């Protein structure tokens, strides 16, 4: 076990909630079209004056309040967003500013697309374990609405905006990460992408407006995930030293109804064990996992003494899983 103790979670969403019915009217679709295509009843969408880092800071402040802590009690901030607020500097420094962290508090980003939170939690546990830090905050915040292409129904209607934060401390060995595994399959690198904004496609190298919007081949993502996920999960469970019957709660990335249904099938665990917030939040990119974790904690479905499984897929194509003793 990698010792780490989860002491608080927090959440923030934009003030504006958008229903699938309202999207039907806005986009000129027949009633029920968006709900049928997306499986989302409503999702939160940021207003033009709401920023990604402000939303992330609100989630961090919520976690600090839930822990009874102040901004100065955080030794390190890790930003774990799927898409940054801007290319440089990192999004974490903007979140630190808005959250009122003292000047000099270290802050950096980790990016693994939709699995950024999971990757950041693994890094945080290592940094706590070697004694360099006592308390670390991880914040995932994404404004997917800023990058959707409404001409692609499959890739635009499933997303929502939001942020979540987790605060972790050095553990004593009674709680922590029991198993962690991540695998990347570059054959799927083009299945989910935003081509513009980096060194390859930009105003100097040549780009088109569509390069800055999200594009997805959902069927290809699903086919590859179905192919590699069963063996991946088997290896994760072997590493944990126990079977799925030992898992008390499952927190999956809220990718899509199809993805959640497939996860339920291959896990073969009671539906009551699986945290599902997709219908009321949509896919919040990297914020999905910690938001679902926050839901599990705040509703009493994830409590000390339980074993929790986080799992999901991300652009790359990357799949990941983590088993935690709370």
Image (spheres, rainbow, N blue to C red):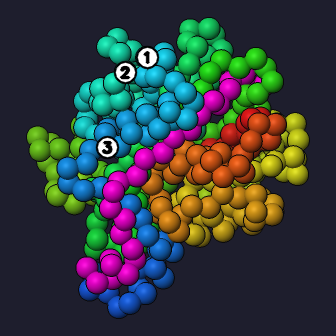
Q: Is residue 176 left or right of residue 93?
A: right
Relative to 18, is 201 on the left or the right?
left
Q: Percent position (x, y) of residue 272?
A: 76, 63
The residue where tag 3 is placed is 52
Instruction: Please tell me whether mark 2 or mark 3 is closer to you in this view.
Output: 2
Q: Is residue 215 magenta?
A: no
Q: Position of residue 40 (x, y in %)?
A: 48, 71
Residue at 38% x, 81% y: name it: 21
Q: Secondary structure at mark 2?
A: loop
How far apart in space, not on screen, are marks 3 and 1 (Cα)? 22 Å
In this figure, which residue is indicated by the disc labeled 2?
Answer: 101
Quadrant of the rendered structure where residue 182 is? top right
SS under mark 1: helix
Question: Could you tell me if the residues under marks 1 and 2 are in contact, i.e. CB atoms within 8 Å?
Answer: yes
Mark seen at residue 72: 1
Q: Earlier in the sequence, mark 1 or mark 2?
A: 1
- Label 1 CA crowd tier, 10 Å (few <14, some 14–19, many 20+): few
Residue under the point 50% across and 33% down: 65
């Amino acid at each position: 076990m990698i010792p780490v103790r989860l002491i608080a979670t927090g959440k923030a969403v934009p003030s504006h909630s958008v229903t699938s019915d309202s999207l039907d009217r806005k986009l000129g679709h027949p009633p029920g079209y968006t709900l049928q295509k997306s499986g989302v009843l409503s999702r939160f969408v940021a207003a033009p004056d709401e920023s990604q880092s402000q939303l992330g800071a609100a989630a961090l402040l919520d976690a600090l309040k839930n822990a009874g802590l102040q901004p100065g009690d955080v030794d390190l901030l890790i930003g774990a967003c799927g898409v940054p607020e801007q290319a440089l500097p990192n999004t974490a420094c903007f979140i630190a500013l808005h959250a009122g962290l003292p000047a000099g508090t270290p802050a950096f980003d980790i990016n693994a697309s939709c699995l950024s939170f999971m990757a950041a939690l693994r890094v945080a546990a290592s940094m706590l374990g070697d004694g360099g830090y006592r308390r670390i905050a991880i914040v995932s915040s994404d404004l997917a609405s800023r990058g959707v292409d409404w001409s692609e129904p499959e890739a635009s209607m499933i997303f929502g905006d939001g942020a979540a934060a987790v605060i972790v401390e050095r553990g004593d060995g009674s709680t922590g990460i029991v198993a962690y595994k991540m695998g990347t399959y570059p054959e799927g690198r083009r299945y989910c992408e935003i081509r513009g904004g980096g060194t390859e496609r930009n105003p100097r190298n040549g780009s088109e407006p569509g390069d800055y919007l999200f594009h997805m081949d959902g069927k290809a993502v699903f086919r590859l995930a179905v192919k590699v996920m069963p063996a991946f999960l088997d290896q994760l469970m072997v590493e944990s030293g126990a079977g799925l019957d030992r898992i008390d709660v499952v927190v999956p990335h809220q990718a899509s109804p199809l993805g959640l249904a497939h996860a339920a099938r291959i896990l073969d665990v009671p539906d009551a064990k699986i945290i599902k917030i997709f219908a009321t939040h949509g896919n919040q990119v990297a914020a999905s996992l910690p938001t679902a974790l926050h839901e599990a904690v705040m509703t009493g479905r994830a409590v000390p003494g339980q074993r929790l499984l986080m799992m999901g897929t991300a652009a790359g194509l990357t799949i990941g899983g983590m088993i935690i003793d709370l």
